[in-house]
């Protein structure tokens, strides 16, 4: 079977709590159209965590990209917030703080690309994860 050529989809999202549902539905549609149904549930969960964090810890609009390559699918959420995300272990009674631990556990890889330029007065980052479809 020939390898599928790379592709990329992007979605600008407003700083609005409803954006999480819109992004989930969009990622689901993109992956199903690409016949990557095996990644849909995990991708929806992880992108929900990242978009929720972008909404909670930034006051700006955001951008979500979904990119397919020979290595799998990379989803990134870009925002202009200056808070640098990190995974930590939440206590049993904590109501928050598990999102990036979920990403770390479920993704094949994840990370943060910092786009801060203090000289120019710019802040920003992209939090991303990779998922690889399992071979049949």
Image (spheres, rainbow, N blue to C red):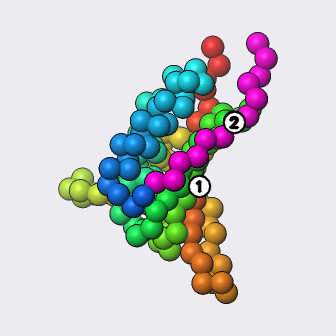
In the rendering, which numbered label is found on residue 39?
Answer: none
Q: Residue at x 60, y 78 (%)?
A: 122
Instruction: Please identify the quarter of the rendering in which residue 88 is found.
Output: bottom left
Disc with the residue nearer the chain's start (2 vs 1): 2
Total numbered circles: 2
Residue 80, magenta (yes or no) = no
Residue 129 vs 72, above or below: the answer is below
What residue did someone put label 2 on? Answer: 7
* Outermost residue to the left: 93
Count residues near mark 2 (Cα–Cα under 10 Å), then give few for <14, some for 14-19, many for 20+: few
* Range shown magenta: 1-13
Instruction: In this rendered view, identify the residue nearer to me: 12 or 35.
Output: 12
Residue 127 on image: x %, y % = 55, 56
* Outermost residue to the right: 2
Instruction: In this rendered view, identify the residue nearer to me: 83 or 6.
Output: 6
Q: Residue at x 47, y 37 (%)?
A: 26
Instruction: Please identify the quarter of the rendering in which residue 91 is found.
Output: bottom left
Residue 25 vs 59, above or below: the answer is above
Taking 117 as reference, is 42 left or right? left
Residue 96 vs 119, above or below: the answer is above
Residue 90 on image: x %, y % = 32, 57
Q: Residue at x 52, y 69 (%)?
A: 80
From this viewpoint, is residue 100 visible?
Answer: no
In the rendering, which numbered label is found on residue 111?
Answer: 1
Residue 9, magenta (yes or no) = yes
Q: Are marks 2 and 1 in contact (CB under 8 Å)?
A: no
Residue 111 on image: x %, y % = 59, 55
Q: Quadrant of the N terminus?
A: top right
* Outermost residue to the bottom: 119
């Amino acid at each position: 079977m020939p390898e599928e050529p790379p592709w990329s989809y992007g979605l600008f999202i407003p700083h609005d709590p409803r954006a999480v549902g819109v992004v989930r539905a969009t990622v689901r549609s993109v992956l199903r159209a690409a016949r990557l149904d095996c990644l849909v549930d995990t991708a929806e969960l992880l992108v929900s965590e990242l978009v929720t964090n972008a909404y909670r810890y930034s006051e700006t609009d955001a951008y979500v990209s979904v990119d397919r390559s020979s290595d799998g699918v990379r989803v990134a959420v870009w925002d202009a917030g200056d808070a640098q995300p990190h995974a930590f272990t939440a206590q049993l009674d904590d109501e928050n703080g598990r999102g990036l631990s979920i990403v770390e556990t479920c993704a094949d890889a994840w990370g943060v690309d910092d786009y801060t330029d203090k000289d120019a007065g710019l802040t920003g980052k992209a939090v991303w994860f990779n998922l690889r479809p399992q071979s049949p």
